[in-house]
Amino acid sequence: MSKKRCVIYPKDVQIITGRSERYGHSLLGKIKVVNGKEPYQFVTLHEFAEFSGIPISQIESYIY
């Protein structure tokens, strides 16, 4: 059985968008602010999909 992640990291954002890892840090920070999260909390794949407008199925193909 393979394990799936439910959180997204800046490196994942870099792979999905083709932008820099620094951009990934910045984007995840914006998503945390919009969702009212603390800096130490994680961003889920669903939150990223909702914010970016990218379908979750496409994001999952890059993550898994």
Image (cartoon, grey):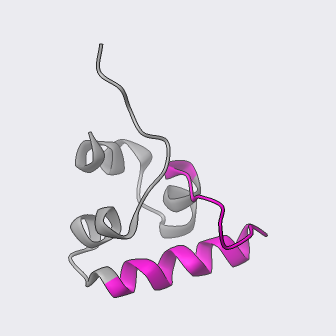
> Residue 8 in the image: x percent, y percent?
44, 56
Compared across the picture, whether 38 is left or right of 28 comes to right
Question: Residue reaching furthest front?
Answer: 40
Corner quadrant of residue 40: bottom right
Corner quadrant of residue 9: bottom left
| 12 or 47: nearer the viewer | 12
Residue occupying the point 59% across, 57% down: 47
Corner quadrant of residue 34: bottom right
| 54 or 13: nearer the viewer | 13
Residue occupying the point 35% across, 86% down: 22
On-image quarter of the C terminus: top left
Residue occupying the point 43% across, 46% down: 56
Give, as a single range, the part of the protein colored magenta.
22-46
> Residue 55 in the image: x percent, y percent?
42, 51
> Residue 4 in the image: x percent, y percent?
38, 32
On-image quarter of the N terminus: top left
Q: Is residue 20 above or below residue 40?
A: below
Question: Residue reaching furthest top?
Answer: 1
| 40 or 57: nearer the viewer | 40
Q: Is residue 38 above or below residue 8?
A: below
Compared across the picture, whether 46 is left or right of 16 comes to right
Q: Main secondary structure of the magenta part?
A: helix
Q: Is residue 63 above or below residue 43?
A: above
Q: Is residue 20 in the magenta section?
A: no
Residue occupying the point 33% across, 43% down: 60
Question: Residue reaching furthest right?
Answer: 36
